[in-house]
Image (tube, helix red, strand yellow):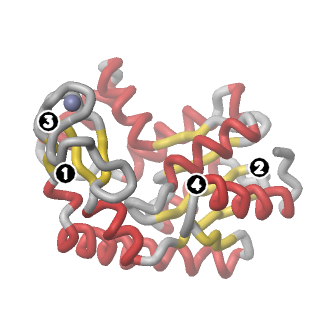
Amino acid sequence: MRVILLGAPGSGKGTLGERISRATGFPRISTGDLLRKAVREGTPVGRKAEAVMKAGGLVDDATVTGLVRDRIAAPDCLGGYILDGFPRTVAQAEAVEAIDPARPEVVLDLLVSEDVIVARLDGRRICEACGDVYHIVNKPPKPPSVCDACGGDLVQRPDDAAATVRERLRVYREATAPLQARYRAKGTYRPVDGDGFPEDVYSRAAGVLAGEGCRL
Ligand SMILES: [Zn+2]
């Protein structure tokens, strides 16, 4: 089984991917992780990608697809794998299908309303000193604006401010619409309600996967 995870920033896609990975034994493949690993190890692809990212650019399709091709060929992917953050474009979707054409596919699209995502991200506060993450409603620090763990100052990342989040979501929706349309037409598209507790979201996703014959 190839499980493809779609979901906006703040949708909880990473958390869901980890849970599905634990339940199925399928590795979760994140292209962000693959790129960081290639950079860390100083491979030819990693050195090229590092130069592009340092210049503020996006790593090209062929490079990312090459990393995914090598990762999918590893023995731990034989029984199945989860793609998180890839494909992002129809061209990348076609590339995955060309690399591994016989694999049954399920596309889980984690749907969370824009207001819920804005509330999740806008309320997030991060400790400048130790990196601990708080939330003004869901996980408030005891004294306001101070880290419980180390006493450091808590700040909001500029990316998490409401106006920025709405803009990021708009960009995400525009970029993802062609992919959603493609998978709908192909018959592998499965929307999943991403509102509520992570346990409930996981149960819904697990129900969909079980319906596709996936053992959890
Ligand atoms: Zn701290």
User: Residue at (76%, 34%) from the top-left corner?
Assistant: 78
Q: Amino acid at mark 3?
A: Glu
* Residue 1: numbered disc: 2
Q: CA distance from mark 3 to mark 2?
A: 41 Å
Residue 31: x and y, percent? 44, 43
Q: Earlier in the sequence, mark 3 or mark 2?
A: 2
Q: Earlier in the sequence, mark 3 or mark 4?
A: 3
* Residue 198: numbered disc: 4
Label 4's element?
helix
Decide if residue 42 is on the left or right side of residue 95: left
Q: Earlier in the sequence, mark 2 or mark 1?
A: 2
User: Residue at (56%, 65%) from the top-left corner?
Assistant: 196
User: Residue at (70%, 51%) from the top-left corner?
Assistant: 2
Decide if residue 21 is on the left or right side of residue 153: right
Observer-side mark, 4 or 1, equals 4
Q: Amino acid at mark 1?
A: Gly
Q: Earlier in the sequence, mark 2 or mark 4?
A: 2
Q: Amino acid at mark 4?
A: Pro
| Residue placed under numbered mark 3 in the picture | 128
* Residue 57: numbered disc: 1
Q: Sort mark 3 into few (<14), some (14-19) or many (20+) by Cα contacts within 10 Å.
A: some
Q: Are marks 4 and 1 in contact (CB under 8 Å)?
A: no
Residue 94: x and y, percent? 57, 62
